[in-house]
Image: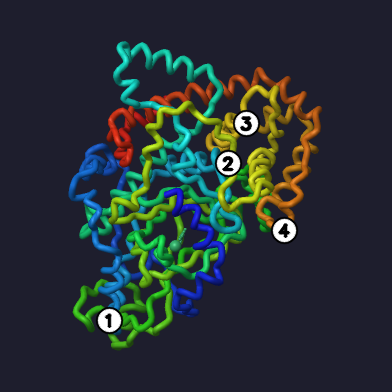
Amino acid sequence: MIEASSNLRELFGDSDDELDEVEETDGDDNSYSSTSAVACVEISTSEDSRGTNKKLKVTKDPSPTRRDGNGPRNDNYDSVSSHSSLCYNEWSKRIGICDDVLTPGECDELIAVHESEAHHGYIDHLTVTRISDLVDHAPNYNSSEQTQRHDQQQQQQQKQQRQQQEPLHNAVYLALPLLRARYEVWQAVEDCFPEHCLELLPEFTALTAWHKGSFLENHYDSNRSYLEDRFISAVLYLNDPVGSECGNCNSNDDDDACDLHPENYHCTGFEGGDLVFEVPEGTSRLGANIGCQTNVSTPSDQTLQKHQITHPEKSTRVVTPRAGRLVCFPSCGRYVHRVEKITRGTRYALTMWFTRRDEAMERLQSLFLSQAAANLAPQQQPWETPQQAELLRRRIFLRPKIPLPDKNSLLSETEWRHLIAYCWWKKGIPLWEILSKSFTTETAMTDADIVEGRVFDNSSSRNPGIAMNSSTRTKLQKSESQLERVVREWRDHYVNPRRNGMASAMARWNADGMLATFVKDDEMKCI
Ligand SMILES: O=C(O)CCC(=O)C(=O)O
Ligand SMILES: [Fe+2]
């Protein structure tokens, strides 16, 4: 997975190269929305049906059939569709759309997880949190060493007490909701591709934040030799687009309201960002013509059928993101797609690929390393310059107007970052207000504006030089009593329950650490 991700910049960053390999189509005159168009695989999973029973229906534990490593290459969707009079319905039904795969609350938590540990992504204006960003530095929760200990329960209690007192060194507790969501996506993808049930293995899992200005040109997802193991692509959207008004901050400002109100940066709406598929050239709109099932439903489709019109060669199928909506499709060249530019706000998603080859599977064995926890200060990604990494770090603090902490600060930098995201997620906790009583707002705001403008701007990344003044830091120390209450709530009601849930889930997982399976409801409980 590490190799694959370090190559992602090559995949997405140099869009000129990318387009050379993909047949370009330009027509979007005939685009139509997924919500009203041809029915494909539509599976609505209500909250009830997502209970433990469903989660246990397909066991993700490794079995010889899943893990023999001899699965076929991802050529069948290409070859099924490669005859010249490809049936539109046959093509379209491979684009699975499932709504309510996660609840709004689960989506919000994943957004907060991303905000806690955001790194520069593989294209401009994109930040990512790969699952490995959370677990690679995990302490050993489940080593054989530990299980052999005589008084395991006592050890566990001591450990929990230590955790409650020690500064937060790692982000592993944040992996719990992500692992749960990963499993939900996995199940939904299997539901959409039942013919490949029990074959599909996660190859890559990351939370992605598509900030204003980000987009992806036409591409398909297995379009490099080192990506050819990718078989199914899956994107679970975590927030809704908004109209002209700002969803949460009630601003009527037409001009980038969310971007202008960083203190309300829980306004997670966005504009733009549709996922647009190119219908392959030569595709017939008439499924009946070549004997496949016809389930066309829109008036325009019926008209086409009635008049026996072949669908124009160049057209698109548009999927509009929505919180809890999963879209999954073959990663092969028949499913060329793009992401339209995000023109406002941030579009959040959980992005996954599935493979059928065991060797290509995403490894999570580092969850089981018996290493001491490393300090998870934001780490420089292979494609980042140190300056870019530093700017992103500053942005995380300054966007919500929180001064950069120094050595004497109440919390470590990791803790501050996580606390900021928690408060942002919980919305009702006015961290900025608590702090603003005792630090110089003007300084923080000025810095925030400068950083916001530069963080994604490569041309200015050579000069990140922004220093917080010392009075800001000194004053921050004085607000401890109010802050301490917030910190206690965060630790007691969030960090510790999540840590315990993680430890409990991991105790049930396979000793080789290669497959993380389901996470139980009670392990997710936050008091
Ligand atoms: O986020 C999306 O809608 C699709 C993203 C995508 O195409 C990709 O990451 O390859
Ligand atoms: Fe893609």
- Above-or-below relation of 31 to 308: above
Label whose residue precedes the other's in the sequence (3 or 4): 3
Residue drawn at the location 62% of the way across and 47% of the way down: 250
Residue drawn at the location 25% of the way across and 73% of the way down: 80
What amino acid is labelled 2 in the image? Gln
- Above-or-below relation of 107 to 199: above
Label whose residue precedes the other's in the sequence (1 or 4): 1
Residue 120 at x, y = what percent? 58, 50
Residue drawn at the location 41% of the way across and 55% of the way down: 235
Q: Are marks 4 and 2 in contact (CB under 8 Å)?
A: no
**Residue 459 numbered mark, or none:** 4
Residue beneath label 1, please?
A: 83
Report crowding for label 4: few under 14, some 14 to 19, many 20 or more residues within 10 A (C-alpha). few
Label whose residue precedes the other's in the sequence (1 or 3): 1
Label whose residue precedes the other's in the sequence (4 or 2): 2
Q: Secondary structure at mark 1?
A: loop
Query: Is ligand 1 closer than 8 angstroms to the Cβ of mark 4?
Result: no
Is 213 in front, or is 248?
Answer: 213
Residue 257 at x, y = what percent? 66, 52
Residue beneath label 2, please?
A: 379
Residue beneath label 3, please?
A: 413
Q: In whole angstroms, how far apart are the C-alphas of marks 1 and 3?
A: 57 Å
Q: In whole angstroms, how far apart are the C-alphas of marks 1 and 4?
A: 47 Å
Report crowding for label 1: few under 14, some 14 to 19, many 20 or more residues within 10 A (C-alpha). few
Residue 168 at x, y = what percent? 54, 26
Q: Quadrant of residue 175?
A: top left
Q: In whole angstroms, how far apart are the C-alphas of marks 2 and 3?
A: 13 Å
Label whose residue precedes the other's in the sequence (2 or 1): 1
Q: Secondary structure at mark 3?
A: helix
Q: Quadrant of residue 189?
A: bottom left
What amino acid is labelled 3 in the image? Glu
Label whose residue precedes the other's in the sequence (2 or 3): 2
